[in-house]
Image (tube, rainbow, N blue to C red):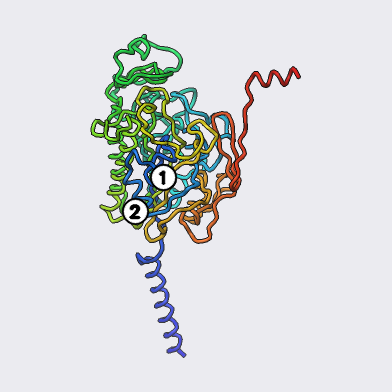
Amino acid sequence: MRTRIRERVTCAVGLGALFVFVLTSPAFAKHPNVLLIMTDDVGYGDIGCYGATQVRTPNVDRLAHEGLRFTSGYCTSATCTPSRYSMLTGEYAWRKPGTGIAPPNATAIIQPGTTTLASIFDDAGYATGVVGKWHLGLGKNSKPDWSGELNPGPLEIGFDYCFIMPTTGDRVPCVYVENHRIAGLEANDPVDVFQGKNPDGQPTGITHRDSLKMDWSHGHNQSIVNGISRIGFMTGGHAARWVDEDMADVFTKQAVAFIEQNHEQPFFLFFATHDIHVPRMPHPRFQGKSGCGYRGDALEQMDWSVGKLLDTLDRFNLTNDTLVIFCSDNGPVLDDGYKDGAVEKLHGHQPAGPLRGGKYSHYEGGTRTPMITRWPGNISQGESSEIVCSVDFVASFAAMLGSKLPAEAAPDSFNVLDSLLGKEDAKGREYLVEQGTRTLGLRVGEWKLVEQRRSKKDRQQQVRA
């Protein structure tokens, strides 16, 4: 009897050891690192694997060659702030007041305690970071404390680390923020930001237009920083101000450093390029490279940044352990306030490809963007026509991590993980609400309903009738 008991115990211990081995074996399926690359104003037709021939994007094309290219991949909004809000929260931005294009002094739009894409990874034990464009507000009260602590911000909604630009390149303040403070700010030169007034009679894009390195076409004619006039006025922070030509290098270096510092643990990195948003002022090594003006040059610079991150994954043998997602925050735009040759130097390039509309528009070109997923060994190379959207990332990755979302969280986010991974017979979402600047569109299957906003004259005529 004792022999049988001993044999059963030995067997149980053996099975337990085997179970532990299987769980810890590299061959056992595990949650991947996630590298989310969101570009800025990159259209459906701006990438080689989506039909572009006038500009070269070999690194993004490599992702498509090794992964899954979506022909119905979407953001929710045709402008940046609402698109980024919905991606991080899983909620359509039009549901929440105050999610329009954030002005220079915008305070935190996503409040602490909100379930976000970052927080679900953080709760799962991942190192979490955001590098690049933020444009979701910082701080609290009536305006950010630019020379003090910028809290709340990314660190209060699930990110462990951030190195960001507060708004976007055509708006002040033209500084980087690392975690809670402006990077490189000198104590004796505090920063302040003003909207609608010139606080100290400083030169502007109107008064000193002849001195600009890039002329403006509309708006964008207030404070001059690095020879480019912006939206809004800023004072101080001279040592901390960015150089536009170096921006892609700076952000790429910070993103690479995040991977280097966290390569031995699971990580989630949100890399938000500023390319190809205006002002398009690429590094001199890219200027003139594309033959399509600074907009085309910025596209090739963006692709270079992608390549540097992919090289870093290769260097640490993380390629097979990392799910990479490439997408854009909204569709393309040519003249967006600066005379940078975007219109004159297209040379047949079609930024939105075959789609109608672009940035600001509720037509397909405003919200249908490039979207690619790659995870070698788990995603087969190919093409998918399933409808997926960046608003679905919250629910999809929560499902991947085995996390249960609170009942009130991510109300518009669907679990389309199987579609993102290209699983056989997987289905994407059945419908999607798409937001323009003042109107909405609704895609259901192969049909789309577009809201038409009547002019003031039409409304007056109807009232008189």
Q: Nearer the viewer, residue 68 or 168?
A: 68
Left or right: 124 in relation to 205? right
Label 2 amino acid? Gln
Which residue is at 76% across, 19% downward?
465
Q: Nearer the viewer, residue 230 or 303?
A: 303
Q: Quadrant of residue 457?
A: top right
Left or right: 404 in relation to 44? right
Where in the figure is residue 93, as x and y percent of width and height? Answer: 55, 36
> For numbered disc 1, what is the local secondary structure?
helix
Q: Nearer the viewer, residue 42 or 308?
A: 42
Left or right: 167 in relation to 225? right
Q: Which residue is tagged 2?
A: 265
- Position of residue 390 relative to residue 153, above or below, is below
Which residue is at 29% across, 25% downward?
240
Query: Does residue 52 appear anywhere in the picture?
Result: yes
> For numbered disc 2, what is the local secondary structure?
loop
Where in the figure is residue 136, as x and y percent of width and height? Answer: 46, 32
Label 1 amino acid? Tyr
Where in the figure is residue 358, as x and y percent of width and height? Answer: 48, 33
Separation (CA) of disc 1 from disc 2: 34 Å
- Position of residue 139 relative to residue 395, above or below, is above
- Position of residue 429 relative to residue 77, above or below, is below
Q: Which residue is tagged 1?
A: 50
Residue ranking furthest to the right? 465
